[in-house]
Image (tube, rainbow, N blue to C red):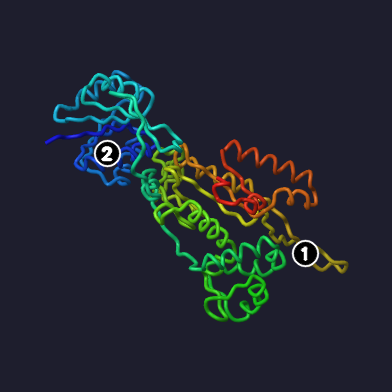
Amino acid sequence: MKKTILISLISDQTLPNIQLIKEVKVINNDCDYLMITTESMEKKGIVNHIVDATGIDNVNRTIVSHDSYIDIKEAISQYDFSDYDKIIVNITGGTKMMELAVFDWFKENDKAEIYYIPGNNKSLEYYQLRPTNQKHKFTQSSSLKEYLTGYGFRIQETESSGISKEQTKIIFEKYCDGVFDTHKEDLILLRNFRNRNISNENYNKLHNFLIDIDYTPKEEGKLNSLEINYLTGEWFEEYIGSIVKSDLNLSDNEILVGAKIYSNSETKELNSIKSLIDVEPKQNQVENEIDVMFIYNNSLYVIECKTSIINIIKVQKEKKDKNGNIILETKEKIQNILGETIYKSDALKTKFGLFAKSYIFTLTDFKEYIRNSAYPQNNERSMIVNINRAEVSKIKLIDKQQILQAKNIQDLL
């Protein structure tokens, strides 16, 4: 019986290994797998992530020194390849030294086929380097769950509002027409009730708002928690998610809207809880809320949706009147949250592989925001700083005018 082995070089970038494993599995269901890895990759559990994402078994590991050419070749020589009729080698991952050593070891082996997968490959092609030079097209695509699992994430899907795409489009148009701007107090009330229900007199206060946005509650005289979360901003991520799915013709397993993903914290501790305050640390699960995330052409796209980059908060200060009595004076304070949104998107982007694409969609018109502000020059300077920060982080900003002018979501990506 003919046997095949696939050799993978392990690094933080797991997608190239997952891609070739999926290709090989279709033809060689009983393939063996050899993971050439390092101590640091083992501590991070990278091989386990790949195995979980692809569902493979018959997996062996060879741990090498990441920067020693001699050590890497010596470790490979300890493995018996005589039982295999075909040796498939993916040199995409690992360190440069690992790539060189593995390529040199197998380049004269008549049984070996050596492959390389270029990053950010929109053409969905990968390259055979030995024994002949040729291009191949991927026949298998990765689901979003496979991608995230490969990078060590666990997904928790959140409950959808269940509100129709047609209703969401109406809400989008009402927001763009400025209807929400005339109901600031109603929106403050709604935000105070996020994740709860509204009924009775609080519901009655929202009567005009609901009429103006053409929204009929699912239950008369009441708004449930899902509806409240939807009306206070989640409608926008549902709107963007629906047009992404429609315009790009994505399947359900290629897109997530309004989900939570969890990752284990890094094993390397810069600040040990135990040593600093003598408390045993709990298993640390880092939670990230995702607005819209999808796989398209084997690339990951992450979109943060903000109806507005402006956050208005009410600040109370004590003040004495002319009689010396202390009164509370309430003032509105305007915050531009674009900077912290960019920071959050950048922090997330670094966890999703080298070629993940990150976006911030907002229904704030940047030019109008600057023009209509009390201090346009200050706001312009602040916006320039934030736009440059987004550019450095390779985060694409999409504002209201761009969204309205786009004929298709592909115009914005």
Q: In this view, does 38 lie to the left or right of 363?
A: left
**Mark 2: secondary structure:** helix
Q: Which residue is pictured at 69% across the width and 52% down the height?
A: 365
Evaluate whether residue 410 shows in this view.
yes
Q: Is residue 27 left or right of residue 212?
A: left
Q: In this view, does 60 lie to the left or right of 234?
A: left
* Coordinates of residue 410 in the picture (x, y in percent): 54, 47
- Choose mark 1 or mark 2, whichever is in front: 2
Most extreme residue toward the left is 1
- Residue 122 vs residue 306, the one in the foreground: 122
Most extreme residue toward the right is 322
Which amino acid, by three-letter code, is at mark 2? Val
* Coordinates of residue 229 in the picture (x, y in percent): 55, 65
Disc 2 crowd, CA 10 A, few/some/many (<14, 14-19, 20+)? some
* Coordinates of residue 123 in the picture (x, y in percent): 44, 37
In the picture of the structure, the residue carrying the numbered disc 2 is: 24
